[in-house]
Image (cartoon, rainbow, N blue to C red):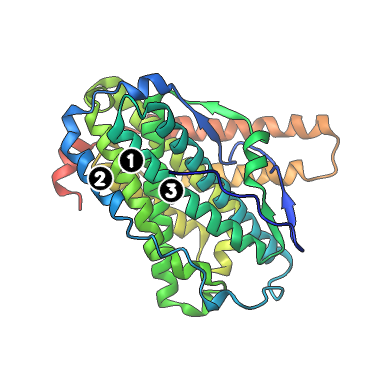
Amino acid sequence: MVTALPAPKAGNSQVKTAIAENLLSPRFYITDFDKAATMDLSLEAEGLQAMLNEMRADYNRHHFSRDDSFKQGWDHIQGEERQAFIDYLERSCVSEFSGFLLFKELSRRIKDRSPVLAEIFSLMARDEARHAGFLNKCMQDFHISLDLAKLTKNRTYTFFPVEWIVYAVYLSEKIGYWRYILIYRHLEQHPEHCFYPLFNYFESWCQDENRHGDIFKVLVRSQPDLWQTWQGRLWSRFFLLSVFATHSLTVHERAKFYTMLGLDATQFDTEVVRKTNDTAARAFPVSLNVDHPDFFPRLERAADRNLKIKQLMASSAPGWVKQLRKIPLVLGIAGDLLRLYLIKPLDAEALRGTVR
């Protein structure tokens, strides 16, 4: 049984009960629980049972235990670098906790009507709780932590239809997998950039993300309307672009963090998007044409405009001036994303046999 995470002890840490919300902040979601409970899963019943068995095995049950490498002080990480890493930990923790809340509530609300799916969601909530708790413990090494119980009450919840949840969670889990594994592989080759032991946990950690994504892949394929219809093709295309755009803007906001790891933010973003797009072709009816000459330049331009908005809003200019100057930047981002959406996608059904 999954329970809520305990509030951290204050000690010498600043305990936060709320975080600033903006367009790129992790969201807390609710959905149509009745519709989730009555989904016809018969087309993928065997696949769901296989994933349930995978989740019951709990391969990472002993993974999230801090070893002796954490037993040192971290006050040598200071200034802009310290803040960049704390921001990364905070947003990652909130994102994992958001998944915990959604999966926990789904499990609770559908357990009497869809027991297999309810158990899967319960086990996914277990994993997300471990991730959030581990990240919160890491934050305490830097004298800050999140009171996740109070954060639950202070956040605004966003309603997503079940279909949107399936698309969005599938992509968020798969893009999370590629983020973790690419950082891990990079640090294997360049251990001098491994400035904190959290990254040593990413290889096994990312397998949780991969399994969760595989569960939602089964859910996508269990619902023909999500991939066999023209609406499914348009929604797949929309969520691919939305997730990739959010990733690009966020990575470029965190450029200092990636520099600390010895990574170029733009190159890292490009590789993650490419890998995730290839992976999504196994589940979705379309994939994006990331080789189109406009694709990555427009994503990068949108990210640059987003950084200009951040700089503008942090300036000492009067509020009305900020809002006025913000308009062309927002319109520019919207225009770039619209042009990207209109790039003809690739037929993933035709490509599926070549995807590895």
Q: Is residue 84 left or right of residue 134?
A: right
- Check contact, mark 2 vs mark 1: CB within 8 A: yes
Viewer-side residue, 270 vs 42: 42
Q: Quadrant of the N terminus?
A: top left
Q: Secondary structure at mark 2?
A: helix
Instruction: Decide if residue 300 is in sight here.
Output: no
Where's residue 242, x and y in %? Answer: 46, 36
Where's residue 281, x and y in %? Answer: 26, 42
Tell me which residue sits at (74%, 66%) in the image.
79
Crowding at label 3, few (<14), some or many (≥20) Cα neighbours within 10 Å? many
Where's residue 35, x and y in %? Answer: 36, 20
Query: What whole-number distance in Å separates the C-alpha atoms at marks 2 and 1?
Result: 8 Å
Tell me which residue sits at (33%, 45%) in the image.
213
Mark found first going from the N terminus, 3 or 2: 2
Q: Is residue 131 above or below residue 334?
A: below
Q: What amino acid does circle 2 point to?
A: Met
Quadrant of res 38: top left
Mark found first going from the N terminus, 1 or 3: 1
Label disc, if present, on residue 51 of the rendered structure: 2
Tell me which residue sits at (68%, 72%) in the image.
77
Instruction: Decide if residue 243 is in sight here.
Output: yes
Residue beneath disc 1: 120
Label disc, if present, on residue 126 of the rendered structure: 3
Mark found first going from the N terminus, 2 or 1: 2
Q: What amino acid does circle 3 point to?
A: Arg
Crowding at label 2, few (<14), some or many (≥20) Cα neighbours within 10 Å? many
